[in-house]
Amino acid sequence: MRHLIDITDLSVQEIDELIATAEDIIENKPKYAHVCAGKKLATLFFEPSTRTRLSFEAAMYELGGHVLGFASADSSSASKGESVTDTIRTVGCYADIIAMRHPKEGAPMAASLRSTVPIINAGDGGHNHPTQTLTDLLTIHRERGSLDNFTIGFCGDLKFGRTVHSLVSALSRNKGINFIFISPAELRIPEYIKSGVLEKNGIPYREVESMEEVMPELDILYMTRVQRERFFNEADYIRLKDTYILDPSKLRDAKPDMRILHPLPRVNEIAHSVDDDPRACYFKQVENGKHVRMALIMKLLEVKA
Ligand code: CP
């Protein structure tokens, strides 16, 4: 039985295969309409979500399966003090696979140790978000035709941004990726990613505070939200939340074929006037998320079209 807790639980070859399956799903949807007939996915969301939960649910329905679960800890027996592991052992009696989001880093890993069915980490605190990474990789592949040889700028909250942590880990295994981290000093990419992922593998990177300074170099700009829910101090959040606001004037020096990604939700960091720019890919990401999660569910349930 396989779980997906960290993106590196999947080899580069397995990620390539998931992307190929997702692209086949996009082209040949009817072929996949019944492959999960009789199977059940449980979505256990102890933390809010729109895209991840609903795309998992849509994915399972489009594979012909069924869905059960809860959208907040308040509506589950977690609110009565039940542990994550007891919840997982219980839900494993009802479902064939579980997608779980939790505010505590490591909770899906702890759950996987006691689970009788595959666990998918749908986001754990400020740590990891591997299925957003699959979404991002599918989007980059569809936009550029390859996952190698480009310069990517990560901008915003790189400290708590779990989608950034997972995507950096994934891309560190690809060829010719040039990483630029754009953040205020307080929200820099964590030391464990710099030393444990990049420096350990001899991968060069730069840290800057100005988005404008590096804009002309970027092939991909990966924007992120400053996340109010991760701050201990509201005053710090207010001070940092609007550090970066991408608007059409900032895109003047960008490459004509640069791609703008954002895992969403956004608050102020991308002006709505950017949405019609052909370089904006964040709503394509939303759609790609469903297709790559279909491919992932099939892989972990070991079903084929
Ligand atoms: N990208 C993402 O995880 O969005 P949600 O929080 O809406 O699931």
Image: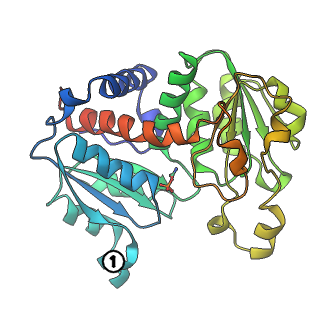
Query: In the current view of this chain or complex, which residue is farthest to the left?
Result: 38
Give the number of callouts: 1
Q: Residue at x 63, y 51 (%)?
A: 161
Looking at the image, residue 285 sits to the left or right of residue 184; the answer is left
Asked if residue 190 shows in the view, the reply is no
Residue 103 position within the rendered picture, expressed as x and y whole percent measured from the top left = 50, 64
Residue 90 lies, with reference to residue 222, above or below; the image says below
* Disc 1 residue type (three-letter): Ser
- Residue of label 1: 75
Residue 112 position within the rendered picture, expressed as x and y whole percent measured from the top left = 32, 52
Q: Secondary structure at mark 1?
A: helix
Residue 77 lies, with reference to residue 240, above or below; the image says below
Residue 242 position within the rendered picture, expressed as x and y whole percent measured from the top left = 80, 59
Asked if residue 146 shows in the view, the reply is yes
189 vs 273, nearest the viewer: 273
205 vs 250, nearest the viewer: 250
Q: Residue at x 39, y 73 (%)?
A: 73
Q: Residue at x 60, y 16 (%)?
A: 148
Q: Quadrant of residue 5?
A: top left
Callout 1: CB less than 8 Å from ligand 1: no
Q: Quadrant of residue 140?
A: top right
| Label 1: how many Cα within 10 Å (few below 14, some 14–19, many 20+) | few
Q: Residue at x 32, y 36 (%)?
A: 296
Quadrant placement of the N terminus? top left
Quadrant placement of the C terminus? top left
Q: Specify how the rendered protein is coloured.
A: rainbow
249 vs 89, nearest the viewer: 249
Looking at the image, residue 222 sits to the left or right of residue 136; the answer is right
Residue 122 lies, with reference to residue 257, above or below; the image says below
